Image (cartoon, coloured by chain):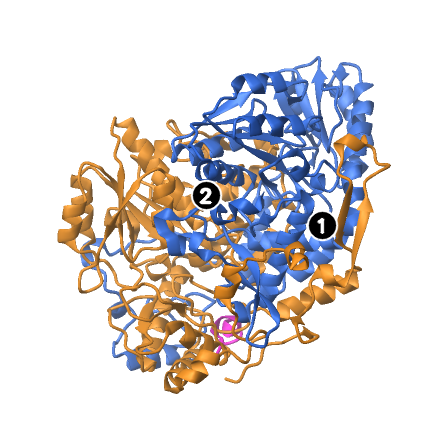
Amino acid sequence: MDYSQARWTEDDDRYEPLLSEKSTRDVSTDDGPLPDDLTRDSLELPDLSEPELARHYTRLSQMNYGVESGPFPLGSCTMKYNPSFTEDLAASPAAAAHPDQPERTTQGTLELLARLQDYLGRIGGMDAVSLQPPAGAAGEFAGILVAQAYHAHNGEDRSEVVIPESAHGTNFASAAMAGYDVVSLASDDAGRVDLDALDAAVGEETAALMLTNPNTLGLFERDIEAIADIVHDAGGLLYYDGANLNALLGRARPGDMGFDVMHYNVHKTFATPHGGGGPGAGPIGVTEELAPFLPAPQVAESKSGYEFVDPEHSIGKVHGFYGNWLVLLKAYAYIARLGDAGLADASAKAVLNANYLAEQIDLDIPFGPFHHEFVASAGDRDAADFAKRMLDYGVHPPTTKWPEIVSEALMTEPTEVESKRTLDQLAEAFDAVADEDGETLASAPESTAAGRIDQVGAARDPCLSWQSLADE
Amino acid sequence: MYAWPLASLITSPGTTLHMTEQGSRGTPYAPHTTATTAAMLDAVGVDSEAALFDIPDPVAFDGEFGIPERSEREVRGHVESILGRNDDLTALLGRGHYDHYVPSVVDDLASRSEFLTSYTQYQPEIAQGFLQALFEYQSLLVELTGLGVANCSMYDAATALGEAATLSQRVRSVSGDRVLVPEQLREGKREVLANYAAGPGVTVDTYPMADGNADLDGLAARLDDDVAMVYAENPTVRGTIEEDLGAVGDLADEYDALFCLGTDPVALALLEEPASVGADVVVGDASSLGTGTAYGFGLGLFVTREEYLRQVPGRLVGAAEDASGRRTYTLTLQTREQHIRRERATSNICTNQAWVALRTAMHAAWLGPDGLVDLAESCVTRARDLAARVDEIRGVRAPVHDRYHFREFVAHTDQPAAAIRSDLADEGYAVHAVGEHEIQICVTETTEQAVDDFVETLSEVAR
């Protein structure tokens, strides 16, 4: 593929100018309805017409790359196509209710939330679901708080959460935010949980083990039953990180594997758009034993309709209102579109695509059998340089340099949305880059709006606003 | 090639339509045909998709979810009919979630797929557009607050407040064991804050309010050296404008506690600049610009002093140079974040609300400084004028607090507030019931046209 991203430049020192460089105006707040001592003096902001703004943001969009632009095999991120019709549903005026309306006037919203709770419970094999956490990491935090409340209710004060080395960084941070000490667990030679190490790591201080399955190498933790036994025998709980659930739809459920609490990343598995970093949603599912501790409120169906109910020993709220409602709405629409067969097929095709792509590229892939993603090694190349050069072929590169168990890792997740033809092109990009010399890689990219960016320099001398730029 | 849209057109048997191994059409969002699937399986060296799954039998799932497949048209009908069960109310509601008119151009530009379907900008060279928009969003908040560092979003006002409390623990010379919040505060905020604060061992305590503003004597009495942070809101949850925020800042300062101020970008365009009243952190919901009401879906703004830069939670966009020597933008200071610092990160946040921030920046830019100040002033005058009209209704006294108000105010009702709220809902209006005899009413440009009818209806139900 040949590719060239739009590049708008102005002068030799900048691309599209900042709003503040186009036109600003300083407006006084005198003569308003408030006395002067309650108001600011003035406000200086960009002052542009709508046509100017439309052009500004259109140009910015042209200097950006999304799933609809081209392949986006970013490992661990599940960059699926986001069906357009779900956007239309989210824009429906009926979706714009205020959260403080009387429950009897928002029966539609509540019914949709109740149905999504139900669907997610079935998909994860969980007994109860809370939709409130607004992102995956927020789900982890809520799930760990639920585990903490459960232990406290049983009169136990456990201080540790065990997490495999190769886990997502959020796992460690979420456990620490809940006040736990983190016990890090090394993998075995095959890239999975080392049962002996696990046995040694868990004990009476273990509140939970957080696990991703398939793990970040794409490997299914085949010893999951033994893992669950070890953790449960020590009185701990098993937490499922749902980041890789797209590998398992209709084939296996966390609830059946012995997990007590899990989060779903609906912006990954259920195709809601990532929006340049968010919003997502991170509902959590739990077993019956943990249901009384879920965030408040949950939606329940009663004789008179749908209503909010507070779980008996709820941890309280983890979001100011009811979570990222518009995202939840899109996720429901996606699940309702695909149904059982579509969901299972999505996982089947995601796993097929990863395996097919891996088969087509010449790089070493040390661990397998993998599912929806694989981790290739860039070998003696710098994985970051390798990725930059891939941009020149019109594809978004894989996640780089992680997990660290693979040297110069290229963590690759094509998802089900790519065709054989696109995967062949993607493989060509991998192989072409692998054949190029180090200098070409180090000076890449050249086809993107901007050339290689000096991130080290940016961190050394942070400049985080146009005000700060003006001071320089 | 693209199986699903064609499916309804092709009726002859034996076509290469994509079918799953279970004989269903499968996901409409995978481009595979029977032929390409077979070729791919062949290349991998297996004879079925099932053979690719390395799942031990005891944990394999062979049941059904019981979720039917539906066509796109059917799902739209299904979801629209569910949402249709919402009553079409005029919501005179606020208390942290507000409705302002969002111009079409925001929807149009923000929906461009290069923005909407993109990921976090880990490859900045191909993501300059979004990075610049976030840099502009950060700059907008710096201008509005007078503080030096804005991050590019938290989930909502409540979680941003929670993050402020944990930040106070990290930047304070001695760790405290309490944060102080107003006794009148949205319950959700208090609960979220308590959950965030519990990890570092901090509890949430309250200080009293006096006629809708912070009670300075009461606050002083609650303060000691163990208080890590004092939180105040402007406007407050009851819609009043704080009249001596500088004194709150001074009190916090006296005890080396951080002063965290909760507000929103519309209010910031008019009310005292946070930096000028000694605020160390500013949090709040920024989606009041750009999104409108969406059942609590929001955007947490987070701004703080430059000296706390290394302790800021969430993503930051900074200016950088590229190989051509031009100014570009990149995520920066990532060593604060979970994917690098893990359990020592400043926060666990990864996915944020970037796209909502994009919308907020677009809306603010569309309004410009005149439009934003006008909008903010209208929030004062609309609340003032409606309160005056409501005050004339027999059985109602408004506003309860002898203060200036922003968007909303509390009214005393002779009748029980719950009954009034319920009766109003029957007539197509929603207000808050915030006390046994107190209702709260919010008005913006999106509900102003309903005000005449509302006042008449309220006068009927409030007697």
Residue at label 1? B102
Could you tell me how far apart the alpha carbons at marks 2 and 1 are, in whole angstroms?
A: 26 Å
Residue B3 colored in magenta in the image: yes
The amino acid beneath tag 2 is Pro
Q: Residues within 10 Å of mark 1 (few under 14, many from 20)?
A: many
Q: Which residues are drawn in magenta?
A: B1-11
> Residue A262: percent from the left, percent from the top?
34, 46
Q: Residue at x 46, y 30 (%)?
A: A309
Element at label 2: loop
**Nearest to the observer: residue A398 or residue B141:** B141
**Nearest to the observer: residue A11 or residue A256:** A11
> Residue A423: percent from the left, percent from the top?
41, 78
Chain given the colour blue: B
> Residue A246: percent from the left, percent from the top?
37, 60
Q: Residue at x 63, y 64 (%)?
A: B112
Residue at label 2? A133
Q: Residues within 10 Å of mark 2 (few under 14, many from 20)?
A: many
Q: Residue at x 72, y 18 (%)?
A: B400
A326 above or below A449?
above
